[in-house]
Image: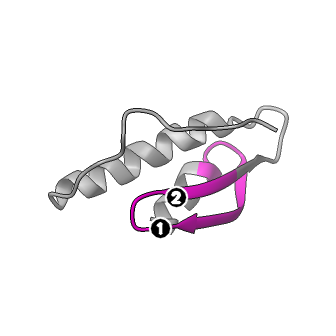
Amino acid sequence: MVERLERAVSGQQCVVPVYVFMPDHCHIMVMGLEEQSDSLAAMYRFRMLTGKWLHSRGLPGWQQSFWDHVM
């Protein structure tokens, strides 16, 4: 998951200063580095990359939406 998170945010000029993965959910802070950074696109990419990985192993995927805050 961490490798996929790094791939997702690097393509959007973002970094992840802190994250925590728990058995049934995760908390991720995404921070843009440039004015054109897109943290929301980074999270969508992360969900896509990890969703495919979970599906390929017969595991349940992510719920339909996620709860996010922009600060």
Figure quadrant of residue 62: top left
Secondary element at image label 2: strand
Query: Identity of the amino acid at label 1?
Result: Met
Secondary element at image label 1: loop
Q: Nearer the viewer, residue 46 or 26?
A: 26
- Residue at the far left in the pictured view: 58
**Residue 30, position in %: x, y?**
70, 50
Q: Quadrant of the C terminus?
A: top right
Q: Residue at x 62, y 50 (%)?
A: 9
Report the magenta residues as a range: 9-29
**Residue 5, position in %: x, y?**
53, 58
Q: Residues within 10 Å of mark 2 (few under 14, many from 20)?
A: few
| Left or right of 48, for residue 71 | right
Q: Are marks 2 and 1 in contact (CB under 8 Å)?
A: yes
Up the image or down, 24 lies above or below 51; here it is below
Figure quadrant of residue 38: top right
| Left or right of 54, for residue 7 | right
Query: Identity of the amino acid at label 2?
Result: Cys
**Residue 57, position in %: x, y?**
18, 61
Q: Can you identify the residue that label 2 sits on?
A: 26
Real-space CA distance between mark 2 and mark 1, rounded to the nearest whole angstrom: 6 Å
Q: Can you identify the residue that label 1 sits on?
A: 22
Q: Residue at x 14, y 57 (%)?
A: 58
